[in-house]
Image (tube, helix red, strand yellow):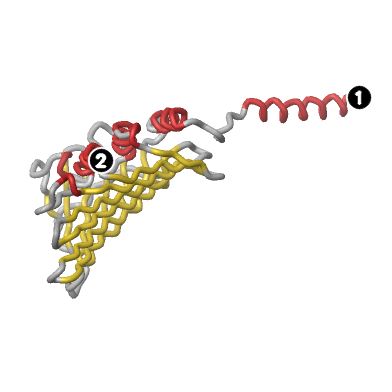
Amino acid sequence: MKKFGRTLILCMSVILFGACSESTDDLTMQEVQTRLDQSTNEVDRYEIDMVLTVLAKDMSRGEQKQVNKGKVQYIEKESPDFHASYITTTDGEPNDAKAEVYKKDNIILTNENGGDWEDISGQVTDEELLSVQYAKMIENLRKVKDELAMKEKEDSYILTYSGNSQDVYKVFKDSFNMSFTGVDSTNISSDLEVVIDKDTMRMKDFNYEAVGKNPTQSVTISVELGYGQVNEVEEIELPKLN
């Protein structure tokens, strides 16, 4: 009898825990956006896999592409600490360019192609640095929420946009330091896809592309961001200056 009672308690516990588990299936757009906003309180530090690509096409000069690939570790705060390292590959250039940036509090150190570290503190503002931190991107999504569509998959929600809205372009151009020379801003189109993981209801992937055209040229700027290592990144430590 005693053994039966214990089994019954265990079974009831399983049932109760199952009933308390909140499903993340079949959420509305508003519910997904609310959960996404709430996720910023859970994300203190993380790593971003980043690919930035610029593709220029000219009727007389042909095509040229530049690709920046790298990683960024962020520690969230009012002015985030971060460590970024990336490699730039440019068509027609014999060698890749390597760069590394550390920011901790008010100190910013840079290094190019393995040279000496340079202190550029006070020479650039937070606005001039690439602003891809998690909370900032969620804030940007909130600004364009009325433009977004949503589809549901088995393990994720996907927010999308495709069109020529200047409001959408203006929201993201500052974060990615984008500019189009010789292109009317009304001729810039945007494509956006954001993947939200159902298990955590956090943003996992962010992909944005802007295309600017004039009669003889087109420029495509694409940004691919993958957010991972959430709350596992260690404190940022500055390298020693030579």
Instruction: Check disc 1 and report the residue beneath it.
Output: 1
The residue at the point 9 percent across, 41 percent down is: 122
The picture places residue 82, in percent across and down from the top left corner, at 27, 44
- Tell me if 6 is positioned left or right of 52 in this view: right
Mark 1: amino acid: Met
- Tell me if 164 is positioned left or right of 195 in this view: left
The residue carrying pointer 2 sits among few (fewer than 14), some (14 to 19) or many (20 or more) residues within 10 Å by Cα, namely some
**Measured along the vertical axis of the image, is residue 156 above or below residue 77?**
below
Give the numbered dot on residue 165. Answer: 2
- Image quarter where the N terminus lies is top right
Of 207 and 115, nearer the camera is 207
Q: What secondary structure is found at the residue carrying circle 2?
A: loop
| Res. 114 in view | no
As drawn, the residue found furthest toward the right would be 1
Mark 2: amino acid: Ser
**Measured along the vertical axis of the image, is residue 32 above or below residue 196?**
above
The residue carrying pointer 1 sits among few (fewer than 14), some (14 to 19) or many (20 or more) residues within 10 Å by Cα, namely few
- Tell me if 51 is positioned left or right of 218 in this view: right
Compute the Cα span from label 2 to label 1.
70 Å
The residue at the point 22 percent across, 68 percent down is: 96
The picture places residue 133, in percent across and down from the top left corner, at 30, 41
Sequence order check, earlier mark of 2 and 1: 1
How many labels, in total?
2
Closer to us: mark 2 or mark 1?
A: 2
- Tell me if 4 is positioned left or right of 33 in this view: right
Give the numbered dot on residue 19. Answer: none
Q: What secondary structure is found at the residue carrying circle 1?
A: loop
The picture places residue 88, in percent across and down from the top left corner, at 23, 63
- Image quarter where the C terminus lies is bottom left
